[in-house]
């Protein structure tokens, strides 16, 4: 696909909206990094709309996603950001995808993995976890966005998560998102995959409970092993219902707490824990193909 | 059981700890409401211990629960509070319960439902959702605690949730806790039950995602219907990863937002939505038997 000029990326927001500032920054980065015009990026207007938490209501987000996915002029569908809301679209998206949709790249992470997982399960060959336009808002976020752009356009791209391989299947999920996908028809067969997990700012209670659910799942129990990406925990809320508790629970358990939890539940489930993964809600977030590295 | 004197209640904390202040207030209430000494309450010392978020480590909480459940002198096991941690005990508790354990009442809600659900699945006949000692910390909490004490001791008790019946099975769960239970071996058969759901201070994203998972579950799809208890939403955190978003997402969607979500996912799943239930993390929280009202 990298040989087609210009390479056209369509950005849609399946969950929460982004700002015009994100569009401006990403567009400027594209203009500066691809001065020959070899890359063209289109932000669907829906990315900036709001309906509660969402970038437009369910119907609007569904329609916008399908417009870009089913349009033969786009080579890649890039999720604008995560946030929340993709799980409300996926059931309506799948039956409405046309044949041209399968020939594109789909890139995103976090909440967007609801759709990435379903597309991977449907046999789409170019599905990957990786940075999104919204990541440019982070300090140093240009590096994350350039990683995504290079992944989509450069055959010599080499910033995959190190586990990614031509021989071993991989998949990457946000812990909360995967937990919510477990019982849906949208979770792909994870047999023999190295499963990478990350999360951001959830309480220890949420992460521990979600890992309990994830590692009890029969599909997940067939993985080759689990690796833990960055998973900073935010206990400022503590376990819910702190009424009458004089001393707040300790904060800042960070990655060590999350790693103990993953190791605990992997041990109970008989799943191999394979150490740390180089992914997370941050500018160092590496690209992880769903399936084999192509 | 109400005819045995004194009726002995053992309090254990499967998740988070309570304070000595809670013990003092509940003990004083028992002394004043049962002056004849017909009710005796024992707080296991483990209730006041701390290990991170937990009331003692996993082993300590498991051992303490089993000491009370397997001791023939107790007529009821009362969960001290929710918080978080019960899901780490249930796998070790179940095979270690003795025959006398099945003859007791078990009462609690929220995080404690991990164990309540597993005991109900094991055929224990006296499992109920209802107030816990920690509820005395709420404004007006004595009424909630008295409701629990009366449920355990008064054959004429009449503060069940109105759906509870001799003819229709019921069950009650915290939304997050049920989501985390879905894939475990501890979730009972919910066929033909009226399933009541409540939650506290989760974000709209967490509630919506959990409801997606819950309503996709084949077991849950066999329920007679779902009723929504109180479910105040706290979006102060918003969807995760608000970096670069100038305007915070709106707060205070409250119950209306949660009801829309339940109705949305019930509609997709073909589950009947049966309206509101009189349960929640509050002093009005009614008693819901797991199964038929006995």
Image (cartoon, coloured by chain):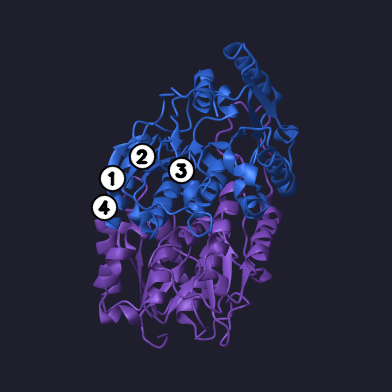
Chain colours: A blue, B purple
Residue A78 x %, y %: 60, 33
- Does label 2 lie on the same chain as label 1? yes
Sequence order check: which comes first, mark 1 or mark 2?
2
Q: Secondary structure at mark 2?
A: strand
**Quick check: marks 3 and 4 in contact, CB under 8 Å?**
no
Label 2 neighbour load within 10 Å: few <14, some 14-19, many 20+: many
Q: Nearer the viewer, residue B103 or A263?
A: A263
**Quick check: marks 1 and 2 in contact, CB under 8 Å?**
yes
Task: Name the mark on residue A267.
Answer: 4
Question: What residue do we see at 24% from left, 71% from top?
Answer: B96
Where A5 sits versus A94, above or below?
above
Question: What residue do we see at 41% from left, 29% from top?
Answer: A160
- The chain identifier of the residue carrying mark 1 reads A
Q: Nearer the viewer, residue B11 or A178?
A: A178
Q: Name the residue tied to disc 3.
A: A173
- Compared across the picture, whether B284 is left or right of B38 comes to right
Q: Name the residue tied to disc 1.
A: A273
- Does label 1 lie on the same chain as label 3? yes
Label 3 neighbour load within 10 Å: few <14, some 14-19, many 20+: many
**Quick check: marks 1 and 4 in contact, CB under 8 Å?**
yes
- Compared across the picture, whether B49 is left or right of B140 comes to left
């Amino acid at each position: 696909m990298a040989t087609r000029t210009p390479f056209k990326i369509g950005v849609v927001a399946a969950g929460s909206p982004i700002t015009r500032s994100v569009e401006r920054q990403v567009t400027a980065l594209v203009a500066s990094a691809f001065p020959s015009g070899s890359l063209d990026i289109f932000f669907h207007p829906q990315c900036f709309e709001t309906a509660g938490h969402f970038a437009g209501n369910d119907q609007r987000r569904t329609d916008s996603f399908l417009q870009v996915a089913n349009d033969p002029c786009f080579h890649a569908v890039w999720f604008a950001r995560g946030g929340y809301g993709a799980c409300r679209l996926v059931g309506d998206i799948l039956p409405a995808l046309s044949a041209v949709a399968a020939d594109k790249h789909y890139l995103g992470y976090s909440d967007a993995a609801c759709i990435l997982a379903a597309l991977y399960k449907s046999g789409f060959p170019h599905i990957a976890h990786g940075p999104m336009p919204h990541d440019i808002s982070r300090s140093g976020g240009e590096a994350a966005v350039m990683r995504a752009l290079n992944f989509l356009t450069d055959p010599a791209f080499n910033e995959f998560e190190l586990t990614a391989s031509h021989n071993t299947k991989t998949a990457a999920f946000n812990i909360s998102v995967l937990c919510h996908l477990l019982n849906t028809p949208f979770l792909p067969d994870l047999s023999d995959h190295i499963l990478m997990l990350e999360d951001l700012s959830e309480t220890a209670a949420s992460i521990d409970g979600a890992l309990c659910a994830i590692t009890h799942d029969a599909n997940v129990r067939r993985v080759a092993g689990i690796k833990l990406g960055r998973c900073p925990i935010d206990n400022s809320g503590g376990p819910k219902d702190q009424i009458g508790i004089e001393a707040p629970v300790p904060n800042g358990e960070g990655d060590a707490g999350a790693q103990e939890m993953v190791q605990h539940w992997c041990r109970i489930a008989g799943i191999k824990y394979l150490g740390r993964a180089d992914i997370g809600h941050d500018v160092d977030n590496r690209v992880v193909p769903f399936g084999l590295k192509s």
